[in-house]
Image (cartoon, grey):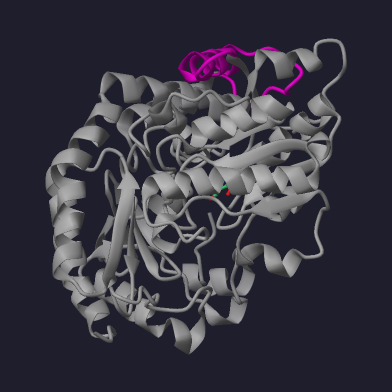
Amino acid sequence: MLPRVTTTTDDDRAHVFHSWSAQAQITPAEITKAQGSHFWTADGTKYLDFSSQLVNVNIGYQHPKLVAAIQQQAERLLTVSPAFANDVRSEAARLIAELAPGDLDSVFFTNGGAEATENAMRMARLHTGRQKVLTTYRSYHGATAGAIAATGEPRRWPSEPSVPGIVHFWGPYLYRSAFHASTETEECERALQHLRDTIMVEGASTIAAIMLETVVGTNGVLVPPGRYLAGVREICDEHGIVFIADEVMAGFGRCGEWFAIDRWGVTPDLICFAKGVNSGYVPIGGVVISRTIADTFADRPYPGGLTYSGHPLACASAVASIGIFKEEGILEHVRGVEETVLRPGLKALAASHPSVGEVRGVGFMYAVELVRSQESREPLVPFNASGAAAAPMGAFAAACREQGLWPFIHFNRTHVVPPCTTTASEMREGLEKLDAALAVADTYTTS
Ligand code: PLP
């Protein structure tokens, strides 16, 4: 090998075009090593990761059994086109189908989350013969053409006018209720009525699907109240609309369940998954499909495919990851540490910091919403703030990093989304670091 004359940063800045970024304004930190719940940057700093990268490293970094499974598969068979049958692909599909609720028993594999939501919308449109898809404001469904059109937040704006046929509506979010509700029950009932009204004026016969993040992820960790998801299911049944649960972020342990929707005992028609299924060790995602929708394509070809659909390396890692979740009781671990450390710890932070407006979440998926004033609920930085307007969140993030904590920050929130394998003592340590960083956020409060 030739000796290297440029640094990683030189090559990165000269040749790597980064996602969502003004290329001249970034200097990405270089990760050189990672293990369990921690990673190290090139300057030797060790970070406790409260972000799981992009909320995908559910099993922690470099899990030895997952690394070994990938190594073994690499030696056995590295690539097979989607048209062939393959042992690890079949096994991954069976395991995922066994975990999915109801009659969702076949899997279309993709390379990630956006391709999963794209294909779920396509399946729903072809199955129903209708065109519109309803999604919520404050949602993210991916960055390809259809997925970004479905997205209900500012990342969609630069792509507009975009793919037609998407209608956005408001989902439940009691802390900033679009329905002037003051209780969970009111929020739930009014959000369902709003959905019914939207369907009435859009025309039920034009609507193929309602696609929801079961628990809204990046846009706020919005946990649906009581009967909301059951109500959506009923509305879909009433009008022959396909219910798509986007579990790309919420699935595979993040909410203490295989699929987050299991918490509410509701069965959607299609589930989109990616991220946590194999912790992103190899790119993979997919759609779990109900028998009825799969039957639509029994004697009619499904018009969609990907060269790497069901890639053996990715499928072998999904099989191994599901096995590790079961052997190591990771779902139980998440629920236990949430109950004993995370939830009480965050509640204590909310009680002692004037900048904390609300903490909410489920499993290892929590948001801490920061405000100027607990009384007015004015966000610590405005919606979609950047530059100087975002400075208070920048200062808070810097304070986290100084403590050796890597936060996940979106608008006026920090999300607590560490690997699902994070131990109780690591979680306590992370909360102490958060406590120290929140003192910086407190200096921006007005009351
Ligand atoms: N859906 C949800 C809920 C997500 O959180 C994401 C990514 O963050 C996606 C879809 C898109 O996934 P990907 O980035 O793998 O395309």
Q: Quadrant of residue 234?
A: top right
Please report the residue visible at 33 percent of the width from the left and 24 percent of the height from the top: 324
Residue 173 lies in what quarter of the image? bottom left
Q: Nearer the viewer, residue 178 or 402?
A: 178
Above or below, comparing residue 360 to residue 414 in the picture: above
Q: Position of residue 306 (x, y in %)?
A: 75, 33
Judging depth in this view, the residue of 174 and 425 nearest the camera is 174
Foreground of the two, 254 or 309: 254
The residue under the point 15% across, 50% down is 344
Which image quadrant is residue 128 in?
A: top right
Q: Which residues are magenta?
A: 77-103
Confirm whether the magenta stretch covers residue 108: no
Coordinates of residue 287 in the picture (x, y in percent): 63, 29
Q: Looking at the image, which residue is at 26% across and 24% down?
A: 329
- Vertical placement of residue 137 versus 390, above or below: above
Q: Is residue 174 left or right of residue 134?
A: left
Q: Relative to residue 133, is residue 311 depicted above or below?
A: above
Whether residue 143 can be seen here:
no
- At a point 18% along the width and 77% down the height, the residue shown is 439
In the image, is residue 283 above or below residue 48?
above
Residue 226 seen: yes
Q: Position of residue 245 (x, y in %)?
A: 57, 35
User: In the image, is residue 102 part of the stretch drawn in magenta?
Assistant: yes
Pick whichever, 4 or 357, lies toward us. Answer: 357
Q: Position of residue 410 (x, y in %)?
A: 44, 65
**Total numbered circles:** 0
Please identify the quadrant where the C terminus is shown. bottom left
